[in-house]
Amino acid sequence: MSEVVKDYYRVYYQNTGIYSPLLKRSHLINEINTSLLHTGMDQLSITIIPIKMSESEYKNRPNELKYYGNGEKEN
């Protein structure tokens, strides 16, 4: 039996060149809302990158998908 593939996301902040950690959908909304609060609607420039992977792939994801592009650990 094969594993269920789920949708995950990364946010690329175009104004800073930083990627978010790999996010589940519920965390994606929080990430965008937090960014809006800190940056403001007129300054926020992002790209949302969808990524499909199984739960075991997510649990064993490489470190670059666990941290922000600047080395800050995900929440």
Image (cartoon, helix red, strand yellow):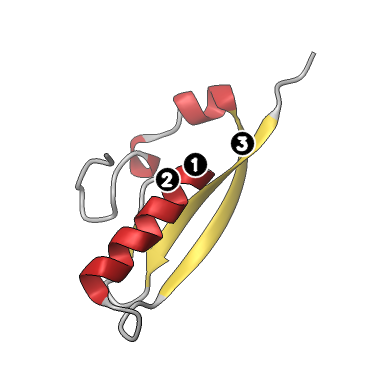
To which residue does mark 1 refer? Answer: 24
Confirm whether residue 23 shows in the render: no
Q: Identify the residue at image location x=48%, y=69%.
A: 47
x, y (%) of residue 25? 52, 46
To which residue does mark 3 refer? Answer: 53
Mark 2 vs mark 3, foreground winner is 2
x, y (%) of residue 7? 61, 43
Q: What's the distance in space between the residues labelled 1 and 3, CA to CA?
A: 11 Å
Circle 3 Cα neighbour tier, 10 Å, few/some/many (<14 / 14–19 / ≥20):
some
Secondary structure category for the residue under label 2: helix
Confirm whether residue 30 shows in the render: yes
Q: Identify the residue at image location x=43%, y=59%.
A: 11
Circle 1 Cα neighbour tier, 10 Å, few/some/many (<14 / 14–19 / ≥20):
some
N-terminal of the pair, mark 1 or mark 3, is: 1
N-terminal of the pair, mark 2 or mark 3, is: 2
Disc number for residue 27: 2
Q: Quadrant of the C terminus?
A: top left
Horizontal relation, residue 7 to residue 45: left or right: right
Secondary structure category for the residue under label 1: loop
Q: Amino acid at mark 3?
A: Met
x, y (%) of residue 8? 55, 44
Q: Quadrant of residue 12?
A: bottom left
Q: Quadrant of the N terminus?
A: top right
Q: What's the distance in space between the residues labelled 2 and 1, CA to CA?
A: 5 Å
Q: Nearer the viewer, residue 64 or 24?
A: 24
Q: Identify the residue at image location x=34%, y=36%.
A: 63
